[in-house]
Image: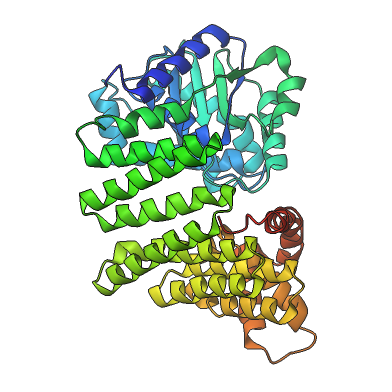
């Protein structure tokens, strides 16, 4: 591993913070970082769980999704058993000199019986059993998690509380990720302050990304292009329009030099996007129209990869119309983005585009337009998986459309289809769940619409 790599430098800093702050009595640890730094938390856990780890602790790391406090220990045990049963894992253990069998029968029994209470009690037992099995019974053990899905922070807080109440062998530690602004797990950490520790560190990730992206800029046109992108961002942050224009022109020239049309299209749209703060609508439109022509030519020539960029251009056009109070035109651009996304077969992106139109129409109290946007989105119901439904804005439009239509138009097939889809994705009480989500999410989007930020 390259010791001078900006990412390696930061991982080393995290190791130093750990060494300085984590004590044997801490049974609960959290890295409290910016939300966007979750990749570094993941990198830290993965590194320490590998043979290249720099701490003396024995680490395991799981992405096990979290659904509720009652079943999470069961899910973790199941995940761990699945990992252990993997022949590849057995090979790795054997290469590390561990050739004996791990007695997992009591854990397997509890998992198969779905005995959730027993699983809560067995998690610390399984950790100690694993330490004995690997011949490291005295090692400090760190059980680190980063749930790839988190349905309820409040429930996760309850599960952390349960963890703290379970009897544990000394040297057994649980590691979680928390957001600096969110402080989601603060309640448990404060209550058990003698047995918990919060690790904080400014990872300066923007600097790291910049260093990596612009390495070799003097000789590599692609690296120089990335340098232009960063300099444009800096100039925009400093509200220096002339410097932004200077780097914007350089980015376009650099994009042309590479001959890479996707890069050139990126230059036009990035420069235009950064000009929004300066309200230079004439230049914004010129850049966007040039970029749209370029993207259309490329699509016609068979360049599939540029299609998402063309959709992005349409939403930028909509946003610019919105700022200029050309409201009907703005809505048309958002709908165009949705229609074109459907034509390209990009169903999730189509839903997002229709949602932009839907929120904008709601904000303007345009009932018919709002209905049309949700109708277009709901016509895609059969083409969305349950996971895509949960990850998109579809639920808000489905909830609203069903509410408006179910009493007045009993024969609307979209209502029945969307209701079935929502029940499959969220369960029988899906409307209550979406009501809660809607209150937070839609308020935020309406604020953005008010500020003219909805699409950019």
Rendering coords of residue 273 (x, y %): 50, 52
Question: Is residue 439 at least partly visible in the picture?
Answer: yes
Q: Which residue lies furthest to the right in this view?
A: 407
Which of these two is toward me, 433 or 311? 311
Residue 192 point in image, percent of width and height: 73, 19
Residue placed at 51% from the left, 75% from the top? Answer: 336
Picture coordinates of residue 28, whole percent (x, y):
62, 21
- Residue 106 in sight: no
Relative to residue 214, is residue 390 drawn left or right?
Answer: right
What colour scheme was applied to this rendering of the protein?
Answer: rainbow
Residue 182 image-quadrant placement: top right
Position of the N terminus, as image quadrant, is top left
Does 371 sit above or below residue 282?
below
Q: Which residue is drawn at 51% across and 13% down?
A: 18
Q: Which of 211 and 261 is in front in this view?
A: 261
Q: In this view, does 244 lie above or below 176?
A: below
Where residue 323 appears, as percent x and y from the top left, is: 64, 60
């Amino acid at each position: 591993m390259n010791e001078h790599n900006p990412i390696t430098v930061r991982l080393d800093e995290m190791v130093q913070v750990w060494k300085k702050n984590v004590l044997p009595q801490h049974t609960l640890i959290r890295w409290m970082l910016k939300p966007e730094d979750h990749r570094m938390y993941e990198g830290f856990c993965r590194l320490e769980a590998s043979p290249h780890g720099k701490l003396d602790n024995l680490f395991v790391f799981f992405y096990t999704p979290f659904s509720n406090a009652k079943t999470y220990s069961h899910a973790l045990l199941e995940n761990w058993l699945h990992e252990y049963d993997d022949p590849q894992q057995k090979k790795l253990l054997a290469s590390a000199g561990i050739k004996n069998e791990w007695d997992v029968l009591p854990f397997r029994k509890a998992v198969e019986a779905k005995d959730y209470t027993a699983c809560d009690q067995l998690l610390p037992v399984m950790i100690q059993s694993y330490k004995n099995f690997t011949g490291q019974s005295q090692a400090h053990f760190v059980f680190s998690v980063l749930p790839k899905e988190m349905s309820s922070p409040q429930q996760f807080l309850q599960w952390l509380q349960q963890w703290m109440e379970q009897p544990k062998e000394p040297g057994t530690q649980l590691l979680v990720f928390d957001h600096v602004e969110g402080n989601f797990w603060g309640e448990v950490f404060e209550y058990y302050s003698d047995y918990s520790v919060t690790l904080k560190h400014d990872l300066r990730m923007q600097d790291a990304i910049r260093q990596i992206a612009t390495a070799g800029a003097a000789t590599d046109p692609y690296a120089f292009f990335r340098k232009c992108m960063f300099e444009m961002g800096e100039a925009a942050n400093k509200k220096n329009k002339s410097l932004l224009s200077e780097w914007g022109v350089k980015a376009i020239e650099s994009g042309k030099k590479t001959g890479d049309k996707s890069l050139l299209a990126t230059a036009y749209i990035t420069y235009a996007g950064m000009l929004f703060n300066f309200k230079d609508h004439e230049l914004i439109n010129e850049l966007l129209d040039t970029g749209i022509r370029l993207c259309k030519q490329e699509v016609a020539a068979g360049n599939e990869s540029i299609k998402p960029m063309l959709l992005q251009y349409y939403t930028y056009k909509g946003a610019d119309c919105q700022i200029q109070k050309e409201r009907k035109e703005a809505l048309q651009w958002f709908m165009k983005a949705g229609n074109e996304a459907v034509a390209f077969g990009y169903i999730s992106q189509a839903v997002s585009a229709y949602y932009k139109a839907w929120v904008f129409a709601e904000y303007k109290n345009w009932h018919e337009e709002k209905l049309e946007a949700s109708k277009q989105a709901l016509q895609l119901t059969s083409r969305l998986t349950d996971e895509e439904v949960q990850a998109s804005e579809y639920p808000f439009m489905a909830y609203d459309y069903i509410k408006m239509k179910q009493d007045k138009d009993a024969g609307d097939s979209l209502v029945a289809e969307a209701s079935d889809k929502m029940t499959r994705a969220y369960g029988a009480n899906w409307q209550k769940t979406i009501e809660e989500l809607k209150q937070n999410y839609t308020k935020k989007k309406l604020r953005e619409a008010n500020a003219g930020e909805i699409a950019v």
